[in-house]
Image (tube, rainbow, N blue to C red):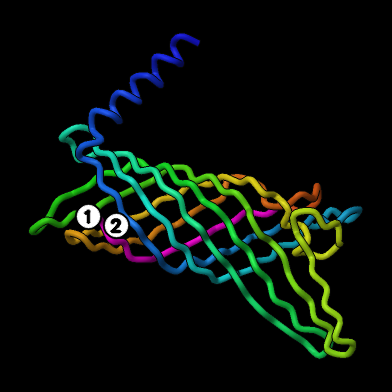
Amino acid sequence: MKKILSVFTLMAALVAFNAANAQGSIHAGYVQNNLISTYTVPVVNTTVYDTLTRPGVYAGFNYNIPFGSSNFGVTFGANVEYFAKSDSNALYKRKFQQLDLVVPVYLNYAIPFGSNSTFTLFAGPTLGLGLINKSTYTGKLTGTVTEYNYFDTQDATEEAYYRERFTWALTGGVRLNFGGFGIHAGYTYGMSDNFSSASTKGTSKRIFVGANINF
C-alpha cells in the first residue's frame, strides 16, 4: 500500500510541477461507430458475423500536461458522443439513438515544425459510460409508438443486446496544431464486450476526425 501511495504522490507532484506549461483545448467532429457482432447459433455451433454502422458527432475538451521540457506529455479529457440513425419498411419506421460519455487518458509525443506548429502522436485507454441507448418504433398501420431501452430490455432482437453501460477501449491517433487551431483524427478499438448475452459478442470500432481550438 505504501508503494502505491508513493507512486500516486509522485504522479501528483509531476502534474503539479508541469501544470504551468499545460495546454487546454475544446474540440468537435464526426465519429462513426462500427459494431462488429458475432452470434453463436446453439446446437449447430455456427457463428454468424454482422456489422452495424452508426454515424455520429462528438464534442469535448482535452487538457495536456507536458513532462518537463521534453516532447512527451499526458492528456486527460472528456467527450460526449451522439449517434443517430433511422430506417423504415412497409410496416414501421425506426429511429435509433445512442449517447455516450467517453473519458480518454492519452500519452502523446509532439514534434515541432514550422512556426508555432506541432505534429502529435497520441495513444491510450478510453473509458465509456452509456447514457442513452434506445430505439423508437412507430407502426405505420396502427400508429402505435414503442420505445426500447437497450440497457434493460430483454427483447430477442439483435440490437436489444446493447446493454453494457461501462466499456473500455484503446485509442490511437494524430493531431496537427497550428498555434491556436488544430485538426485531429484517430481510431478506437473496443476491448470489452458490448452485449449482455452469453451467445452474442460485440466489439466496437470507431473512427473519428475533427477540429480543435487551443488555449
In the image, which disc is placed on residue 79? none
Q: Amino acid at mark 1?
A: Phe
Left or right of 150? Residue 142 is right
Task: Report the residue at 55% width, 71% height from top.
Answer: 55
Q: Nearer the viewer, residue 91 or 197?
A: 91
Q: Which residues are magenta?
A: 201-215
Q: Is residue 26 magenta?
A: no
> Mark 1 = which residue?
119
**Mark with earlier residue (1, 2):** 1
At label 1, counting other C-alpha atoms closer than 10 Å, the crowd grade (few under 14, some 14-19, many 20 or more) is some
Q: Which mark is residue 175?
A: 2
Mark 1: secondary structure: strand
Question: Going 18% across and 49% down the picture, which residue do you hit?
Answer: 111
Q: CA distance from mark 1 to mark 2?
A: 6 Å
Residue 187 drawn at (x, y percent): 45, 57
For disc 2, the neighbor class at 10 Å (few under 14, some 14 to 19, many from 20) is many
Indicate the quadrant where residue 181 lies: bottom left
Residue at the (26%, 62%) spot, across then down: 182
**Amino acid at pointer 2:** Arg
What is the secondary structure assignment of the residue under circle 2?
strand
Query: Horizontally, is 108 left or right of 200 in the view?
Result: left
